[in-house]
Image (cartoon, rainbow, N blue to C red):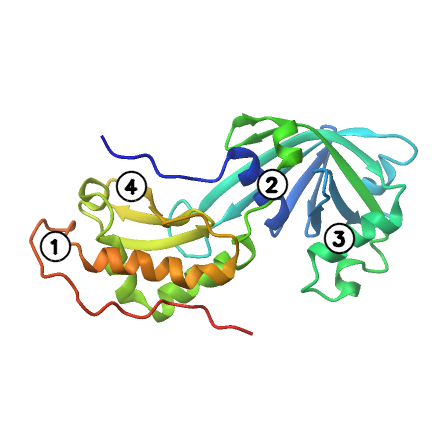
Amino acid sequence: MPIAPIVPAAAERARTVLGHTPTSVLEVGADLAVVLDVLAVDVDGTLVTVVDAGGPLADRPAGHAVIGTLRAALVSPVPGPDRRLDAVTVHGTVEVADDVRTALDVLLAAHGDRPADLVLRPEASVLLRIRVAQLRLDGEPVDPDAYARAVADPMAGGSDEFVEHLLRAHPEQVVRLAHLLDPDVVQDAHAVAPERVDRFGLTVRVDTPAGTRRARLDFPAALRGPAELPAAMRALQSRAAQVTVCPFGGGTRAPDRSAAPSPEPRQG
């Protein structure tokens, strides 16, 4: 029986989506939906955003909390079908933040790579907090208490850059890594691409005439941060180099005795 891959827990995945989604949509009532391009997660799991001072989303919660729904997702940076990786729906309450300094610090810490005047535009001066009551990950309920205790995956911030670099600069190593996949997964495949890296491994998308499949390549041990990624990738490459049966056609091949250097994204 195949061993199930190790993946981040649902609460961690939900926290990762909310902490790294490029955009989200906040719905208040049946008549108001606003796209948010700035969102941050506080230590306790509450969400912080900033909206136009003159917009309807600033007026609705003025003086009292209102019920709202937030939808967010992460998508693969690699072109292809079915790019959505994880999607989160949050049900909770929306209110004007009364702890302006703290809420502001949360936003700026989460978006430190963006100039402050882009995070806090003059016309976007109302800080909101969204308090999480219920949430779902890909349609499945997530325990709110587990979510509040969870932290985002430490690899999430650099995942897109890493998989893009792997495809652009090391396509031959992507093919080599695919030899670690189960032959049933890659049967009739016409494209194989990495989609995401997390602390437990690499998610790979396999495109076939029958549709898209996803598979995992597990690291030898969970990573504590990006500095450990090169060694983990070298370990995967070393394993792939020893595979003697080609999963794409079932033929045999000699083990690759010259493991290539670990692919590393450009720094800086």
Q: Which residue is drawn at 33% across and 34% down?
A: 4
Q: Is mark 1 on a helix, strand or loop?
A: loop
The answer for how far apart the CA atoms under marks 3 and 1 are is 50 Å
**Residue 89, x across and y down, in percent:** 60, 33
Numbered badge on residue 211: 4
Tell me the amino acid under the disc marked 1: Thr
Residue under circle 2? 15
Mark 3, secondary structure of its residue: helix
- Residue at the image point whose x is 18% and y is 47% from the top: 188
Observer-nearest residue: 155 or 58?
155
- Asked if residue 53 shows in the view, the reply is no
Q: Disc 2 or 1, which lies upstream in sequence?
A: 2
Task: Looking at the picture, tell me which residue is in the foreground, 213 or 220.
Answer: 220
Mark 4 or 3, nearer chain start: 3
Q: Say the numbered circle drawn on residue 107.
A: 3
- Choose the circle earlier in sequence order: 1 or 4: 4
Task: Tell me if residue 261 comes above or below residue 148 in the rendering.
Answer: below
Label 2 – label 1 distance at C-alpha: 40 Å
Mark 3 or mark 1, which has the lower sequence index?
Answer: 3
Name the amino acid type tagged 2: Arg
Work out whether 55 lies above or below 93.
Answer: below
